[in-house]
Amino acid sequence: MSKTEKCIHVIGPNMLQNQLIVTMLSGRNTEFRFALGSNAEPPSPALFSMNGDSGMQNLILYDCLGKSADLIMKALQLELQSLLRTNNIVLFNLHPDCGVEDFALKMGIRGFIYESDESEAVRKAVDAVFAGEIWMSRKKMAQLLLAKPQKTYDNPRTHLTTRETEILKLVALGKSNAQIAKKLHISLHTVKTHLYNTYKKINVSNRTLAAKWASKYL
């Protein structure tokens, strides 16, 4: 019986870094097949489709260096959404305090590698995901499991105006303030004011938490 072929695609603007990752991984496992790409030009879903070959496993390493939580969430909902259906995706160069892990796991992300991690973390993450597991440091896993839930009203939706609800739903879809203003035909200042009031009402401190709240309650 032939061995399962493992395909790894590294997506990120730093091609030297990406090539070093490929060199490191290919030196220890000849079963891997590699491809490189940039964030601006993500791979076509067809590149990683199974094409009826059940003996192929696909893994995408997606570079998040310098990306805010909003940008990462937007990428998950747009350019990576179709890829998530048929591929394993690991986020790497993630900022430790980005705070997107819970949302990313719900979207189907299979692992997280942080800016401060050593190269060994890449090897371990790749092995874990190809073994059908989710890769996350013990520290981050503990933080997620022990995190205290945000305090909310008993029936929080009743405290939001129609406009605030509308804007919050767009935030959950990854829309920027400018995009929301254009879609709703209101000023950017008005959007910011509504969001400021909404954050206070639902007791969150940033956009990422607001999007999580909206996904749960709206």
Image (cartoon, helix red, strand yellow):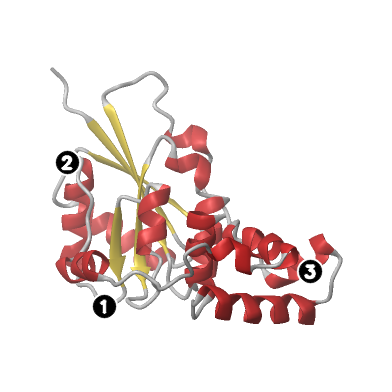
Report the residue that reaches farthest toward the right: 185
Q: Which residue is mark 2?
A: 131
Of label 1 and label 2, which has the lower sequence position?
1
Of label 1 and label 3, which has the lower sequence position?
1
Pointer 3: residues within 10 angstroms few (<14), some, or many (20+)?
Answer: some
Residue at 47%, 41% in the rendered image = 83
Of label 3 and label 2, which has the lower sequence position?
2
Gap in Å between the C-alphas at discs 1 and 3?
A: 37 Å
Q: Are marks 3 and 2 in contact (CB under 8 Å)?
A: no
Q: Which mark is residue 116?
A: 1
Gap in Å between the C-alphas at discs 1 and 2?
A: 24 Å
Of the pair 195 and 78, the residue shown nearer to us = 195
- Left or right: where 8 falls relative to 39: left
Judging from the image, what secondary structure is the residue with disc 3 in? helix
Q: Which mark is residue 104?
A: none
Percent of width and height locating residue 13:
49, 65
Q: Which mark is residue 181?
A: 3
- Left or right: where 80 falls relative to 186: left
Pointer 2: residues within 10 angstroms few (<14), some, or many (20+)?
Answer: few
Question: Which callout, 3 or 2, points to the residue nearer the camera?
Answer: 3
Percent of width and height locating residue 24:
21, 58
Of the pair 41 and 99, the residue shown nearer to us = 99
- Left or right: where 159 falls relative to 3: right
Q: Disc 1 marks which amino acid?
A: Ser
Of the pair 121 and 100, the residue shown nearer to us = 100
Vertical relation: 138 (above or below) 107: below
